[in-house]
Image (cartoon, rainbow, N blue to C red):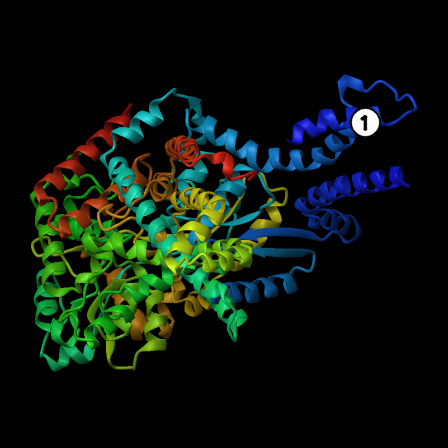
Amino acid sequence: MLFSSLFNRGEENMKMETKPTPQPIFNISKHGMFILLCLLPALLLVSIFIYYPLCKGMIMAFQNYSLFDLTNIRFIGLQNFKSVIVNPDFKQALINSFYWVFFSLIFQFMIGFVLALMMRKKFRGRGIYQAFVFFPWAMSGFLIGLIWRWMFNGQGGVINDLLLKMNLFDTPIPFLADPKWAMASVIMANIWYGVTFFGIMLLAALQSIPEELYEAAKMDGANNIQQLFHITIPYIMPTIIATTLLRVIWILNFPDIIYAMTNGGPAGSTHILSTYMLEKIIYDQDYGQASAIGVIIMILLSFFSIFYLLATKFNKVGDF
Amino acid sequence: MRRARRIFTLLCFWLLLLGMIAGCNSNTNGNDSKNEKNNDVVTLKMIESLTSPSRTKLLKEMIQKFEEANPNIKVELISPPLQSADEKITQMLMAKEDLDVLEVRDQTVKQWSNNGFIEDLSRYTNNWEYWDSLNDAAKHGATSIDNTPYFIPYGIYQKTLFYRKDWFEEAGLEVPKTWDDLYKAAKALTDPSKNRYGYSFRGGAGSSDYVEFMTWAYLGDKINPADGYFTKDGNPMFSTPEAKQALEMFIKLYKDASPPDSINWSYPEMVQGFTSGMTAMLIQDPEVINTCIENMEEETWATAPLPKGPESRVAQQTLGTAGWGITSYSKHKDEAWKLISFLSHPEQNLYFAKNNSLIPIHKSAGEDPFFKEGYFSSYIEMNSKPDEYLIADRPVHYKGWGQFRATAEKDIQALLLGKSSIDSVLEKWSDYWKKEKEQQNN
């Protein structure tokens, strides 16, 4: 789209103009040149701040790059990838990543969708209510992790306190100390955080559905559930596909909550790929291996995105 | 008209880009050089690592005094958040960003000196009148790498035992002298129904430090103090029967006398557990003294020397040091040293150590009643008996040191959860250090 306008629109303009115009350089019209010059500053910034670090990171994945000794940086082929993959912690982190993304996404989406449906109808104080609901999204993930860490505290945490007071349990549950509970606990915190994103995005999409569609459906005798499945969901499908895809990418790349709550523990049971990568940087100071994990995450996400878009007929999603 | 609009739009885009680039470039440099030319004022850039709001305030106060005494030097203090401070400093050093004075710690000194980021200060310390007034611990910390002074410590971090004096008196218990005593007392004071436990256990980040000094206590003088994870005969310390006893004790302490949640506890939870009245004992650094004074009633708590190994009859720990160093590429090294020597002056250091709850670096501070009596006296006692309270160095000069800590923390949690056995973990750690030593020797 962008490139077609770059090369064609100028020609169309030329056809429309009666007086002869000078021959464009490199076959790019004057208009195209103008667009290029406008885009160049942005392109430069994107290259410096996104593509340069990205390429640098990819190169580091093939280097012996340890902060312990920066005087000995050299290419070592696939050694970093080998060292990472053979480590049993990596396998555990990979499996955990799947649980982390899957359960976080499903619940975030469902609760966010219900919230958006509830807020679609006008009611008194909706603005204030919306502001409160969307509040978590404005907070730092690390801070959220710290708050939930204290809430889930096995001894003095508010969640245990409530459970004990409601007589649901006799003894406090060591949420973050027991591997069976730890993963569920960090996922719960992540759900709380991410619900609002779906709430905001889906609400925006819902508000774009013309009211006439519902009126027509009502006249045809459709009930609420039929309206939901035949009007609401199909209408906002492009938003659903785009947001879920974005969330999968973001959730997998989001170590903040886990890092603050459990630091991957107990015994590595809550490590996901991105927290494992942080561990390689912070403890081992091995930027080479950490970059290798980063590249693996990128490859996984690229494959996922392609399959997801193919499976959901991505052309309906539009430009994004 | 249209053409003018186009040119205007284009101009806007490019001006925006130029504006951003100019924004990225710190313009203080320009001001500095102007100042330098006009008034001969040198601006030093200083960065701290173990940042806390109260400490930053204290430092700024001291810097102000320095600036008053040296009107031709200005100091700009950078205070990054504690969590990522060392990484931030490393990145600044790698990019050779403007920095003159920096906080160097025992954890970072090897890496930074290895990469040539920090200056050997011997040409300054050789002529420094207070070098010989430094206590042994401070000197040891300053020259721990290659026998070269890369930084001047501002204080010493050493662990001591904090205990609930009132609970001990109530239960008629003696202050523990050995790890066996500590376990017995901790068990006696544990009552989960009252949410009361004997010991503030550390199972989360930093847990390997606790296994380390327990193992050292059990092994006593068999440890090679210069190469702390190996015995004097060159074997990894984890391959000894004493290491097994220490690890067994470590697990017993968790299972019988510590909150179940403490498998995940690190610094804040341990301290909170003690100050909130959940746990009876805590082993921590001296800065916790200030936290306890602020949060606990007087006479309810006290400090005591570290517990000893049951057979070795000695306790052994490492000295944590942090201090001020100069970047190797600083353009104002002499001025930077002026600042460091000012901060390290006995009077200034005593003031800093008192307010920051640290062990001071000068011998003269031992005579100060603040340290001689009261909560710091356990430190004075430990330092006055060097045969009973030994000092060993961590193997920070091995490449695999950082990785070992990460691995060990996971293994410790697996042990506490009953997912691995003591023997298999010790074997894994012994192999790890054997390999590290082989690699180091090659």
Q: Is residue B420 left or right of residue B113?
A: left
Q: Is residue A41 above or below residue A218?
A: above
Residues B164 and B267: in front is B267
Q: Is residue A58 left or right of residue A99?
A: right
The residue under the point 25% across, 32% down is A87
Q: Is residue A17 above or below residue B106?
A: above
Q: Is residue A102 above or below residue A185?
A: above
Tell me where residue B303 appears, x and y as whole percent: 24, 70
- Residue B7 seen in the current view: yes
Residue most extreme to the front: A220
Quadrant for residue A70, please give it: top left
Give the mark count.
Answer: 1
Which quarter shows the N terminus of chain B? top right
Q: Chain of mark 1?
A: A
**Mark 1 crowdedness (10 Å alpha carbons): few <14, some 14-19, many ≥20:** many
Q: Is residue B343 left or right of residue A143?
A: right
- Residue B131 seen in the current view: no
Tell me where residue B268 appears, x and y as whole percent: 32, 63
The residue under the point 72% across, 24% down is A7
Which quarter shows the C terminus of chain B? top left
Tell me where residue A81 appears, x and y as whole percent: 34, 27
Quadrant for residue B180, please give it: bottom left
Identity of the amino acid at label 1?
Lys
Give the structural element (helix, strand or loop) at label 1.
helix
Tell me where residue B65 appears, x and y as whole percent: 60, 66
Q: Is residue B209 left or right of residue A273?
A: left
Residues A94 and B252: in front is A94
The residue under the point 20% across, 70% down is B279
Reading the image, the residue beneath label 1 is: A30
